Image: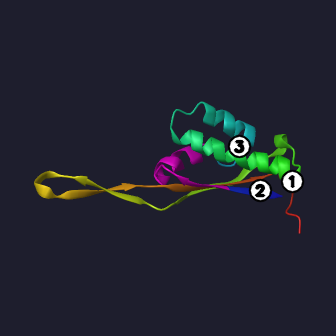
């Protein structure tokens, strides 16, 4: 059985988060959390929070064993972009794009899907 969690509107670009996600794909949940605890990138805290949320949902709502869970699927999508302007020389302005992301985490206990 799979449990899916989505962390939305994270104020970081998807490209930065993708580097961290690639570290923990297809790993057991506990191993992934340990890796992210020692990863020096800022995106590691957001990804770790999403994984822990998915794990908590699986344990509390579906009575799964935390030791059996692994990351079945994890990916990042682009969220809405906040557009700001910065003044430049000679009365001009430059657009600043503040990107956001949505992280989707699916954890599974390794058993087949129940119909």
Please state if 50 lies on the left or on the right of 39 as rendered. right
Q: Residues within 10 Å of mark 2 (few under 14, many from 20)?
A: many
The location of residue 45, given as percent across then percent down, is: 58, 39
Q: Using the rendered view, name the quadrant where residue 20 is placed.
A: top right
Q: Which residue is mark 2?
A: 3
> Alpha carbon of mark 3 to alpha carbon of mark 1: how far?
15 Å
The location of residue 112, given as percent across then percent down, is: 86, 60
Q: Which residue is mark 3?
A: 52
- Mark 2 falls on what kind of element? strand
Check residue 21 for magenta coloring. Answer: yes
Q: Is residue 112 visible?
A: yes
Q: Residue furthest left?
A: 90
Q: Which residue is mark 1?
A: 62
Residue contact between numbered discs 1 and 2, judged by CB atoms under 8 Å: yes
The location of residue 46, given as percent across then percent down, is: 58, 44
Please state if 55 lies on the left or on the right of 80 as rendered. right
> Which comes before the other along the chain, label 3 or label 1?
3
Residue 1's mark?
Answer: none
> Alpha carbon of mark 1 to alpha carbon of mark 2: how far?
8 Å
> Alpha carbon of mark 3 to alpha carbon of mark 2: how far?
12 Å
Residue depicted at x 87% and y 48%:
64
Q: Which residues are magenta?
A: 6-24
Residue depicted at x 76% and y 46%:
55
Where is 97 relative to 33, above or below?
Answer: below
Check residue 58 for magenta coloring. Answer: no
Residue depicted at x 68% and y 37%:
33
The location of residue 27, given as percent across then percent down, is: 71, 44
Q: Quadrant of the N terminus?
A: bottom right
> Which comes before the other along the chain, label 1 or label 2?
2
């Amino acid at each position: 059985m799979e449990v899916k969690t989505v962390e939305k509107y994270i104020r970081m670009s998807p490209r930065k988060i993708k580097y961290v996600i690639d570290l923990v794909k297809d790993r057991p949940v506990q191993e992934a959390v340990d890796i992210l605890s020692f990863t020096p990138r800022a995106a590691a805290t957001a990804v770790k929070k999403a994984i822990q949320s998915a794990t908590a949902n699986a344990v509390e709502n579906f009575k799964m064993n935390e030791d059996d869970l692994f990351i079945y699927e994890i990916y990042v999508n682009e969220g809405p972009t906040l557009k700001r302007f910065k003044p430049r020389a000679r009365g001009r302005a430059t657009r600043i794009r503040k990107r956001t992301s949505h992280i989707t985490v699916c954890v599974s206990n390794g058993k087949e899907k129940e119909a």
